[in-house]
């Protein structure tokens, strides 16, 4: 058991030592979670705002001030780690050069940050468990490939919906059931035009960043979540943006039955989401079971009706669950979610309003764009990368070189990117590798 293994590490005075990037809302939540986990500690915290990071370690991580060493000096940092202290640094390069670290993670919603963290760690021969699904959606196939070549572990953690769904997926497929739809319950009604202005009041009431809340409401976050699990299972969206019907625990099995059985599922093996308070915050897998004995038993157990049944977990715990994935990776070399070699889906960039030449795209939940999931096979028919939709993970900071009308897809050729950024380099390398394999 993981709890037993962690308790043993605590007793031995040999905790799992984590290097974590990010001390924002997600990062500080992760610090608070690790504080209560036996046999695990944050050894290095990387953030440009070292003052904020050090304060978070004290107030949320429960670390005494005398144990925190803020530095960008390799020698001082290594000495601090040897003496059981915690290093706060703005330098990712310093972090990956340190000895005595078991695993690296990035706890931000930024594809750029996640990609840079994972690439630096993998190049240094370090294991990676990302708490950053946006990075995995954008360049996960390439990161997985590079980790395999380097002989290190690459995984996405549990806690966010994709990791939780992989646990359900493993459960139903291990029992031999046929998955029809794998999905999540959206926490709020979809409004594709949401901006920080339209959600500001509700965001402030919940003490959340309006951009963050708008990324939930406009659907971008849901698109990334379901794309992440699609690329790990091979499931595909039934249409751009998915269907997203209203559903309850009582109706979802019938809604996601196959079309020839009266449902809305066009094929087996789809990703989607449902709206409505009954399933909000949970994750589910709807399956078809043809064995009459098993179907009767599942009917009796009220998992569904007829031949369709939905296995539902009513919660996901964000970064609060991530320590379990990290422990499994370090202690047992087990991954939680790893993308397949070939992505099944992608999240493309769609203009929220008319965009003009010279304008810079802002960020998820902002004023300029939203993300929409698409079947990867439908995106591969265009000729040349410049005519293809721009992955939404590359959109933040991209500069428009051509105008794009509201509601239209932004393409690679419509923007100027920071070609030196690891996330851009990795995505171009992923594109070249996959295209080369298809030729």
Image (cartoon, helix red, strand yellow):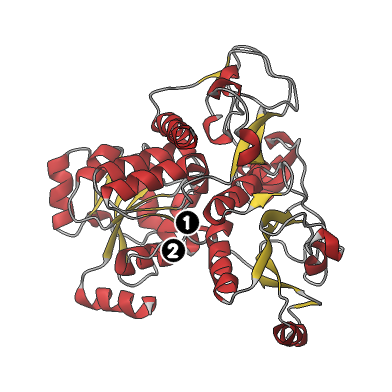
Q: Answer whether residue 313 is visible to the viewer in this image.
A: no
Could you tell whether 205 is left or right of 47 in the image? Answer: right
Q: Which residue is mark 2?
A: 33
Q: Position of residue 80 (x, y in %)?
A: 16, 52
Picture quadrant where residue 124 is located: top left
Which residue is at a point 52% across and 54% down the rendered structure image?
Answer: 232
In the image, residue 212 above or below residue 267: above
Picture quadrant where residue 172 is located: bottom right
Q: Answer whether residue 201 is visible to the viewer in this image.
A: yes
Q: Which residue is mark 1?
A: 29
Give the camera-side residue of 320 and 241: 241
Q: Residues within 10 Å of mark 1 (few under 14, many from 20)?
A: some
Q: Position of residue 110 (x, y in %)?
A: 49, 40
In the image, residue 307 above or below residue 117: below
Which residue is at a point 77% across and 50% down the rendered structure image?
Answer: 243
Give the camera-side residue of 94 and 124: 124
Residue 337 — which label? none
The quarter of the rendered structure image containing the N terminus is: bottom left
Picture quadrant where residue 177 is located: bottom right
Give the camera-side residue of 57 and 123: 123
Q: Position of residue 261 (x, y in %)?
A: 84, 65
In the image, residue 152 above or below residue 165: above
In the image, residue 202 above or below residue 406: below
Residue at the far right in the pictured view: 262
Which residue is at a point 36% across and 36% down the rendered structure image?
Answer: 48
Q: Residues within 10 Å of mark 2 (few under 14, many from 20)?
A: some
Q: Are marks 2 and 1 in contact (CB under 8 Å)?
A: yes
Element at label 1: helix
Q: Position of residue 111 (x, y in %)?
A: 48, 39
Give the camera-side residue of 59 and 37: 37
Which residue is at a point 54% across and 36% down the rendered structure image?
Answer: 393
């Amino acid at each position: 058991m993981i709890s037993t293994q962690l308790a043993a590490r605590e007793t031995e005075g040999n905790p799992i030592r984590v290097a974590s990037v990010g001390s924002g809302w997600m990062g500080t939540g992760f610090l608070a979670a690790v504080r209560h986990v036996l046999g695990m500690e944050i050894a290095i915290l990387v953030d440009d705002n070292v003052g904020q990071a050090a304060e978070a370690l004290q107030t949320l991580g429960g670390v005494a001030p005398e144990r925190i060493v803020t530095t960008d000096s390799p020698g001082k940092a290594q000495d601090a780690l040897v003496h059981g202290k915690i290093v706060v640094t703005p330098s990712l390069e310093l972090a990956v050069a340190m000895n005595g670290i078991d695993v690296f993670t990035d706890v931000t919603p930024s594809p750029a940050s996640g990609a840079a963290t994972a690439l630096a760690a993998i190049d240094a021969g370090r294991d990676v468990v990302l708490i950053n699904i946006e990075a995995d959606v954008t360049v996960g196939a390439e990161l997985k490939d590079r980790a395999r070549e380097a002989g290190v572990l690459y995984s996405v953690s549990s806690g966010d919906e994709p990791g939780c769904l992989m646990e359900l997926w493993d459960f139903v497929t291990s029992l031999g059931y046929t998955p029809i739809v794998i999905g999540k319950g959206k926490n709020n009604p979809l409004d594709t035009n949401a901006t920080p202005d339209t959600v500001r009041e509700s965001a402030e009431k919940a003490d959340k960043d309006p951009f963050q809340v708008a990324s939930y409401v406009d659907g971008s976050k849901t698109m990334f979540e379901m794309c992440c699990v699609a690329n790990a299972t091979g499931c595909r969206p039934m249409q751009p943006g998915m269907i997203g019907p209203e559903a309850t625990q009582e109706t979802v099995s019938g809604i996601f039955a196959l079309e020839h059985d009266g449902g809305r599922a066009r094929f087996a093996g789809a990703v989607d989401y449902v709206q409505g308070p009954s399933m909000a915050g949970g994750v589910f897998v709807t399956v078809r079971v043809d064995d009459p004995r098993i179907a009767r038993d599942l009917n009796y157990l009220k998992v569904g009706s007829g031949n369709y049944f939905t296995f539902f977990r009513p919660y996901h715990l964000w970064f609060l669950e991530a320590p379990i994935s990290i422990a499994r990776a370090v202690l047992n070399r087990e991954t939680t979610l790893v993308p397949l070699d070939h992505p099944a889906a992608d999240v493309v960039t769609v203009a929220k309003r008319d965009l003009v030449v010279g304008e810079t795209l802002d960020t998820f939940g902002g004023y300029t764009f939203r993300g929409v999931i698409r079947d990867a096979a439908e995106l591969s028919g265009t000729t040349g990368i410049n005519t293809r939709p721009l992955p939404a993970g590359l959109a933040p900071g991209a500069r428009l070189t051509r105008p794009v009308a509201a509601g239209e897809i932004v393409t690679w050729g419509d923007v100027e990117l920071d070609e030196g950024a690891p996330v851009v380099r990795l995505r171009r390398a992923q594109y070249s590798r996959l295209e080369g394999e298809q030729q």
